[in-house]
Amino acid sequence: MWLQPCRRPPSILGDQPATNPFDPNCSLFSLLLLNLEEYYFEQHTAHHIQHKGGQNERKIRGSLKICSKSVIFEPDAISQPIIKIPLRDCIKIGKHGENGASRHFAKAKSGEISLSFSQVYFIKEHNIVAPYKIERGKMEYVFELDVSGKVEDVVETLLQLHRASCLDKLGDQTAMITAILQSRLARTSFDKNRFQSVSEELHMECQAEMVTPLVTNPGHVCITDTNLYFQPLNGYPPVVQITLQDVRRIYKRRHGLMPLGLEVFCTEDDLCSDIYLKFYDPQDRDELYFYIATYLEHHVAERTAESYTLQWQRGHLSNYQYLLHLNNLADRSCNDLSQYPVFPWVISDYCSSELDLSNPGTFRDLSKPIGALNKERLERLLTRYQEMPEPRFMYGSHYSSPGYVLFYLVRIAPEYMLCLQNGRFDNADRMFNSIAETWKNCLDGATDFKELIPEFYGDDVSFLVNSLKLNLGKRQGGQMVDDVELPPWAWSPEDFLQKSKDALESNYVSEHLHEWIDLIFGYKQKGSEAVEAHNVFHPLTYEGGVDLNSIEDPDEKVAMLTQILEFGQTPKQLFAIPHPRRITPKFKSSPQTFSCNASIADSPVSPGEESFEDLTEESKTLAWNNIAKLQSYEQYKIHKEAVTGIAVSCNGSSVFTTSQDSTLKMFSKESKMLQRSISFSNMALSSCLLLPGDATVISSSWDNNVYFYSIAFGRRQDTLMGHDDAVSKICWHDNRLYSASWDSTVKVWSGVPAEMTGTKRHQFDMLAELEHDVGVDTISLNAASTLLVSGTKEGTVNIWDLTAATMLHQIPCHSGTVCDTAFSPDSRHVLSTGEDGCLNVIDVQTGMLISSMTSDKPQRCFIWDGNTVLSGSQSGELLVWDLLRGKLSERIQGHTGAVTCIWMNEQCSSIITGGEDRQIMFWKLQY
């Protein structure tokens, strides 16, 4: 029978098979009965002989488990307690009756082992989870093995482990136990009979440990052409098997600050994995990772935080889902309590009878860490910080640690708490008794700065209710610790979680969550920004805070690692610059789209406009949802060289194109005839556009000029000699012309009046000059013409504020020339394509590169709606890209050479492309 980890919500409850502790058929034993960093080696069927040789002699059947620091006897009858004898408390270990005079006699007897010791633990009597009972004083227990021939081997093993437990130095103990473990692993291998099929081909086998909260279980990892297996050394649990076809995500992990972990997920979105493995050699980890990643046909091995940021910003991920993804990418795992997922306190009102989520005062200030929310406490901490020698820190405890996680989860994970605290629950008054008390202590407590865990925003109320009827102690006031006391505004645990979820997804939190992300996962996590934000924790909590390999003293090394694991760890830093804020549109449009006309500062709209906007958005959304169904229906070869620009009259009847053959052509869509061909010089034209009113066409040229052509009068009307090198691209808005050039500038000119007559010439005034380090190949304006993006020959994308003529961001994101750039309809993002084949999405507010995809060929031009891209490829195809899923959705056969320009009408219903094959192609959508 194959054991496969069960699907589970992001909760520690699911990290071992869920059992009812009162079910008489369930096992008493759990790896949580071991000490931290202890291994379970082997078990033997045996009897515990009570009152040996007396009239009341009694045999209790069960199994004797040999562990690295203890001997555990699990009785078959659940009415009997589990017996745990620490090896360090043993006085004598041997065959029963084995002493000088009776040595020969002992060899002839059945397989009995005698243990003399000074302390023993009794655990889970009647299978009830409760603090361990301890009995002290000199005692002797006798265990009789079913297989008497194994006695000598078991005694020898126990004596060896006893010597390790009694070594003075912790480092020496760890080294000796590690040597024993490695010896056992070397003498065993994966049982190939466990393969699901005889035809499976073995790829690699190595030693590793399966990681679950507070427990690591050594064994053998084996990967074949179809399956991943883990076989524990001790046979508990049986073999874990995962079909490679089911794997959806894999992540490399740091475990104990070392690059040794690998977590495998068979789901797209769940935070809890199907298996977490810790390897002894980073090369084994990397080889296994590479094999699985290569196997998965469409697998994105490790998605970046930025790729999720785009989905979150555009409303395709909730705040909850986004935080889960960030935790995952920052090495936070349900299987590692020292790096358990961390979530923010968002509500600050736990006293009112009603929760008002429209009132900003209801919420916690997300721009500050917990320790900085109370001004008086912060002043005391800062005074201590300033007087402290280097390395200084503001907070002596962390916001997430194993103790804090189990503080919240003790009602559903009591055995974890007992494991962490040596068989005891915490003091009743220090337990998780009340939401309001806990929040107050986080605000006022001298050493309490903890944040929350995902369970506070989930659906399972178990952690708030003492459904197991655990005896968690009596408080000073006399009341027993039972269910968690809820705030007045919550009438049930379910209501509390629902309102907490509503708060997390509220407008206020959506608008400020990026500030908390900056503290926990971002640029305010370390360095001077952390100091300024009052966000400095102990150096050992940070990634790279200590190099364990450089510590030669084994005692110091073990002590350091223990401190790191128990104190808590700061997440891996995901963002080095300010995190962009979420887009919270004012429009009541489709939840999957946002307004095309919304600029960076959304303006109020009237009810009538809102309805019209909704209607427009709906038709555009429909068009973009069907963009992969494009079909070409007409194509015309009207140029002698590559087409470089397309402009279309408002009624759609006239199509104007420019080409490297130096001509501007006018094509009638109705008569399907070429109507005009105009040549301004003998050099290539690079782009064209129509002025409002459809009376004038403007073309840019490689001869450094911009040409104005009057359609009505059929002649060149004006020439702007504005640059010292080729003009690569022009844009127009609100009587202003924007021209980009290989002379390293973008210039802004006062424009030509729309009512200009055929004879009138115009005086051009340059309003601004945007200087670049190298030649500019492409520019684009946002919808309101307040921002401009430029792309250079050296791969840099620049975002400019046109109102102040200043550069906002300079992003070197391509390794070759930038082919095309454009703002999203809502002006929040910029997309750029380059000769390196990359499609990059940049957040306008922060300049952060938040998504990057690579194509096999450069994408020369594109149009997009913020979520989906239709690009023209060097291959001649039109490609449809799903930015939110980070993948190529469709390839559509198009030109016989590169697609060089693309035009779409405002309704998104008509598309025209031009190519190096000298053709223009007309496309329509098939709904």
Image: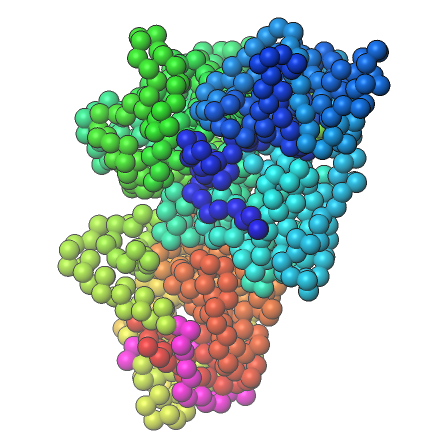
In-front residue for pair 362/914: 362
Q: Is residue 282 above or below residue 100?
A: below
Q: Is residue 289 visible?
A: yes
Whether residue 650 is in magenta: the answer is yes
Outermost front residue: 55
- Which x, y percent locates residue 557? 71, 23
Whether residue 107 is in magenta: the answer is no
Quadrant of the image occupied by residue 82: top right
Quadrant of the image occupied by residue 366: top left
Going by the image, does 921 lie left or right of 613? right
Q: Is residue 508 visible?
A: no
Q: Is residue 257 above or below residue 375?
A: below
- Which x, y percent locates residue 285? 69, 46
In-front residue for pair 489/719: 489
Q: Quadrant of the C terminus?
A: bottom left
In-front residue for pair 428/98: 98
In-front residue for pair 914/564: 564
Quadrant of the image occupied by residue 825: bottom left
- Which x, y percent locates residue 75? 56, 27
- The residue depicted at 33 percent of the width and 58 percent of the height is 592
- The residue depicted at 30 percent of the width and 55 percent of the height is 591
Outermost top residue: 137
Which residues, given as a range, are shown in magenta? 627-651
